[in-house]
Image (spheres, grey):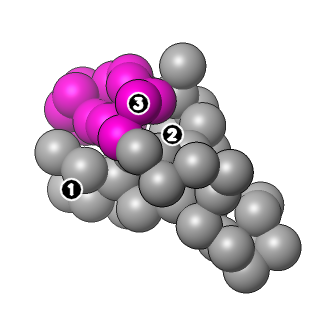
Amino acid sequence: MVAWPDRDYYDGELGIDQGLWENGRCLSCDIEVTSNAKRAFCPYCGSACALT
């Protein structure tokens, strides 16, 4: 699933790059997520995710 960047962490922005190259798993619900930012929110449960 595509995770929305943590806009508070990025001062209201969407992160550094707009490509979907950061990947990982949500530690709360174990769904695989991808985003353009290393700090994002799981689209399924809303938990913060730290991606690669």
Percent position of residue 1, x then y: 17, 45
Locate the C terminus by quadrant.
top right
Residue drawn at (20%, 32%), measured in percent from left and top?
Answer: 31
Q: Residue at x 34, y 52 (%)?
A: 3
What residue sits 82% from the left and 73% below the top? Answer: 11
Between marks 2 and 3 in the image, the one whose residue lies nearer the viewer: 3
Q: Which residue is mark 3?
A: 21
Is residue 43 left or right of 49 when viewed as pictured? Answer: left
* Mark 2 element type: strand
Residue 40: where, in percent of width, then height? Answer: 52, 51
Q: Amino acid at mark 3?
A: Trp
Instruction: Tell me the amino acid under the disc marked 1.
Output: Tyr
Q: Which residue is mark 1?
A: 44
Q: Relative to the observer, which residue lies in front, 29 or 3?
A: 3
Left/right of residue 28 with respect to residue 40 in the rendered view: left
Q: Is residue 22 magenta?
A: yes
Which residues, given as a range, are shown in magenta? 20-34
| Residue 45 vertical position relative to residue 20 in the rendered view, above or below | below
Query: Where does the image place residue 45, in percent across and percent down from the top left?
Result: 28, 56
Closer-to-camera residue (32/34): 34
Q: Is residue 34 visible?
A: yes
Q: Does the magenta-highlighted stretch encompass residue 24? A: yes
First in sequence: mark 2 or mark 3? 3
Q: CA distance from mark 1 to mark 3?
A: 19 Å
**Farthest right residue in view:** 11
Q: Amino acid at mark 2?
A: Cys
Label 2 belongs to which residue? 49
Residue in front for this viewpoint, 44 or 11: 11
